[in-house]
Image: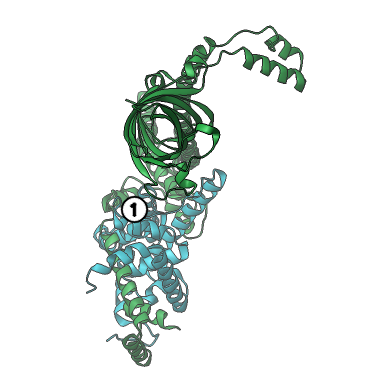
Amino acid sequence: MNTNDNITALLHGELTDDTQLGELMHLLAVSPEKRKNLLEQIRLSRQLLRSGTTLPTPNTGVEGIWNQVMAPNISPTPNVLNGGATVAAGVNSTSTSASITATRERTKRRYLPLLLTLLFGIGGGLLLGWNLSSSNDKLNGDTSLMASSTMEPSPTTSAHSLSPTALSTSSEHIVKENVKVQEREGESLLNSKKSLSRLEQKISTLQEVLRQEQLRTSTLQEENAILRSELATLEAQKSANDSFSVQLPSYPTPDRVETRTTLPASELRDGLAQTLAAVPRMPDTTPEEKQNLVRVEARQFFRTSLPNVQGLDGSGSLVLDREVGVSIRLDDFGLPSRVGIAAGQTIFSQVFHTNTGGALNDTIIEQSPTLFYGRAYIAPHLFGTEKVISSAEIGGGGTELGPIGTIGLGVEYSLSNRVTLGGGVTSWLLWTSFKNQLHTSTNLTGHIGIYVNP
Amino acid sequence: MYLIDSTGMNVTTRNTELEEQELAERAGAGDEPAFRTLFDRYGSKVFRFSLLMVGEKAAAEDIYQDTFVGFLKACRQGKKMYSVRGYLFTIARTRCLNYLETQRRHIELAPEPETHYEFDLAVTDIQDHVRKALMKLPEHYREVLVLCEYDGYSYEEIAETLNISRHIVKNRIYRGKQMLREILQPILNDDDSESIL
C-alpha cells in the first residue's frame, strides 16, 4: 500500500491502523509533494460532493411503484406478470431492460379494465343462463327438479358453463398472451428507440455536413465575387490596351492555335517581334513629367585658371562664383538632351599672355576682373538610368570683356520628381580684348548644382 | 468506536440490515409504510447512482423505477435478502451495465467521431464538468467512486454491495480518483484560490 493510497483511505476514514496513520502523518509533515496530493484529493472530493447536490430528482414516487406491483385488482402471480422472474432477470438477465418493464406496466394498465369487463361479462352471462334454466324448470312444474335446481345448477346447464378453475385458466392464458404481446411491443419499442437514436445521429451528421457545405458555398461565393471584380478590372485594362494594339495578319489566330498543338519557336519569336514593332511607342514621359520639362538651375562653381595649374602663378588659384539659369528638355523633339540659358558673375583671376608672334611673351599681365556673363548651352544625354543621367555640355556666351565658350561633362541624380542634384567639370575659354589685342584664357571649373522643377 | 460482532461485522450495520430485512418482508406482505421507509432510505441514492452511472436522466429514471419494482416483486415472492441495500444496488448496477452495454453496441453500429473533452470554465458549470469527467471513467471505477464519494458508503459496504473484496474497492477508488484528478486538473488548479477547510 503506497502513501497516496493511504491518503485516499485517510480521507474516507478507512485508515484505522495506528502505525500506518503515524507514518502517513509524518510523511505529510515532511513532504510538500504528499501535502499537495492530500490537498488535491480534498478538492476533488469537494467538487464531487458539490456536483452531487445539483442532480435532478426522479419523477416517479413511491406510490407509482407501489401501485405498479401491489395494486389490489391485479391478482395474477408475480411470475405470470413478470414473464418469468423479473427479479431474477434484474439480477442475472442481460436482456430485460427498464424500458421494457415500463412499457409492460403501461400496457397492463391499458388492458386490465378490458380484461375485467370481459371477466365480469362472462360471469354475468353464466349467472343469467343459470337463472333462465331454473325458470324453465319451474314452468315445467317439476317441483323436485325445481327444488334441486335452486340448490345447484343442473348437470346439463353446468356442462355449458365454465367452472371457476376453467375461468382462472382462461384468464391466465389471456394474461399470458397479453404479456407476450407486451413483450413484443416492448422489444419493438426498444428497437424503435435505437432506430430513433441512430436517425438522430444521422441527422446531426447531415446537419454538420450541411453546415460545412453552406460555409464552403459562402466562401466560394466570396471568391467568385472577387474573381468577377478582378475580371472586370482585367477587361477594363484590356480595352485600354486594345486602343493601342494593332491587328497583325501574321499574329497567331485562334484557328491556328486550335489546329496546331505547338508553334515553332522561330514563328513565335517573329510574331512577337512584329507585334512589338507594331505597337506604337508610348511617350517616354507622362503628362506630369511634361509639365516638369522646364527647370530652374543654380550652380556653384569652383574655378581655377589653367596657367595656375601649370604652376606659372600660385596666387588666386581658386574662385568661387555662382550662376542661375533655366533649362528645358528636348526629348519631345527627338533629342534626348537639355538646353538652357544661364547668367552669373565670376572673377577671372588669370594671367594673360599675348598670343602675338605665336610665342610666349615674358610680359605677364594679371587681371582679376569681376565679370557678368550670360551663356547658353546644350547638354546631350550620354547614358543614364531612371535616376541618374550623364551628359556632355557645350555652351557659349559673352562677358563684358568678350566671348566665352564652355565644354564639359556632368552627371545628375534625381532626388525626386522635383529636385535633382548635379555636378560636373567644365573648361571655360575666354576671349578678351586687351589693348586692342585679343587674348585667350582657359580655366578648369568644377561645379555642383541643384535643379528644381517648378 | 465500532462494535464488532463474532462475524467481524459492525453491530450497527448488522442491526440495520436486520431491520431492513424485516421491512422488506412486511412490504412483500402489503405493508406500504414499510416499503415507503425503505424507499425513502434508498430511493434517491439508487437514482443518483443510476444517473451517475448512465449519465442520462430518462434512462436513470427507468432503471431506478425498474429497480424498485423488481425489489418489491422479490419481496412479494418472499425472496430472502441478506442485505436490502446490496440487493437494490445489485439490481441497479446490473441494469446500468446492461444499458451501457446496449449503448456501446449501438455506438459501435453507428460510430461517432472521437471528440476530446475540453474545459471551458467560463461557459459551463464546473459541476457539469465533474459529472462529465466521472462519465469518462470505466464503469468499475465509476461505481465505487459514486458509492463512496456521493453515498458515503464505507469500503466494507461497497465490497458487500458489489460482491468484491475490500482491497479491490480500495484499489479502484484510488485509481479512479487518480484518473479523475488527471481529467479535472484545470478545475483543481483553479480551485487553489479557495480555502481548503
Q: Colour of chain B?
A: cyan
Dot 1: what SS? loop
Q: Is the residue B125 above or below the residue A11 in the image?
A: above
**Residue A436 place in picture, x, y as percent:** 40, 26
Which chain is the one coloured green? A
Compared across the picture, whether B152 is left or right of A184 comes to: left
Foreground residue among A275 and A65:
A275
- Position in image of residue A35 (x %, y %): 33, 80
Question: Which residue is the site of mark 1?
Answer: B120
Q: So how many labels did they put on this image?
A: 1
A440 w.r.t. A318: above or below: above
Q: Image quadrant of residue B72? A: bottom left
Q: Give whichever of A179, B96 is nearer the camera.
A: B96
Chain letter behind tag 1: B
Let me know if residue A135 appears in the view.
no
Residue A259 horizontal/vertical position (percent) = 76, 12
Amino acid on which the number 1 mark rests in the picture: Asp
Q: Quadrant of the C terminus of chain B?
A: bottom left
Query: Quadrant of the image for the N terminus of chain B?
Result: bottom left
x then y, percent, for residue A375? 39, 25
